[in-house]
Image (cartoon, rainbow, N blue to C red):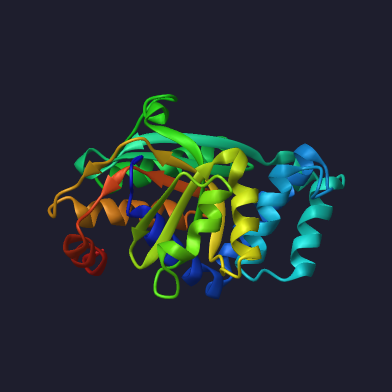
Amino acid sequence: MSGHSKWSSIKHKKGAADAKRGKLFTKLARAITVAARDGGGNVDANPALGLAVQKARDASMPKDNIQRAIDRGTGAGADAAAIESVTYEGYGPGGAAIMVEALTDNRNRTGAEVRHAFERHGGSLGEPGSVAWQFENRGVILVDGDRYGEDDLMPAIDAGAEDVTEDGGLLKITTAATDLAAVRSALEDAGVDVQSAELSMEPKSTVEVGESDAPALLRLMDALEEHDDVDSVHANFDLPEEILEKAAAAS
């Protein structure tokens, strides 16, 4: 089994809360705009755009908002042209490796603010490539573990899913990046409701973080996730459930 991180379930719950505040929609729209700018506005011909749009739909983002984001990317808007993708790498408390993917119109500002977040919460920002080798690009699908069991996910296995694990009340299905869409379609065709499906930098192995470091680590993850320019945060930490609950309450 590949590295298994508790961050998937935490991030999913945070995404639901962000959607209620409308903050998630802003980040989703920016990702759609950049994908449309770089690969065109045809969802069927632009896989990156297709994934960005599907992620927005999963979050119940209104169709009009999605279309406006696509139009902004395919038009001549200066705001779309100014946005660039930047990846930051570093370590958090307890030695957890962290990758931060951002979409920004000011690389210097975002870099300084991300560095400050690491340092403020006991981490350190590293050089490019310092932790990327510990991750690999995978497809990750989450379904409700209370509604479905592993037997319900057999269509995913038949379609190419590589692993199924329990993750904080969710069932996490891992696929090759190229098989994500096919596995999702197989589940939906079988009547399984998918809560989220996205490409993610998944850890090859995990680091178990102790109780003393867990609160600061989760505060760092929160600070990074909540930054306006940050699109996604990936980490390789693992926490026992009892420590995770205590740390989440303390953070």
Q: Nearer the viewer, residue 37 or 111?
A: 37
Q: Quadrant of the N terminus?
A: top left
111 sits to left or right of 180: left
Q: In which quadrant of the rendered view does residue 147 lie? A: bottom left
Where does residue 203 sit, x and y in percent of width and height? 37, 39
Q: Quadrant of the C terminus?
A: bottom left
**How many marks can you see?**
0
Position of 182 relative to 111 (above/below): below
Q: Residue at x 67, y 68 (%)?
A: 61
Viewer-proximal residue, 148 or 101?
Answer: 148
Residue at 68%, 41% (x, y): give it.
Answer: 83
Q: Could you say where residue 176 lies in the image, as x and y percent from the top left?
A: 54, 39
Compared with 241, 5 (above or below) is above
| Residue 106 visible from this viewpoint | no
Horizontal relation, residue 146 to residue 212: left or right: right
Q: Position of residue 41 (x, y in %)?
A: 83, 48
Q: Give the camera-side residue of 56 and 154.
A: 154
Q: Position of residue 36 (x, y in %)?
A: 77, 46
Q: Residue at x 21, y 66 (%)?
A: 250
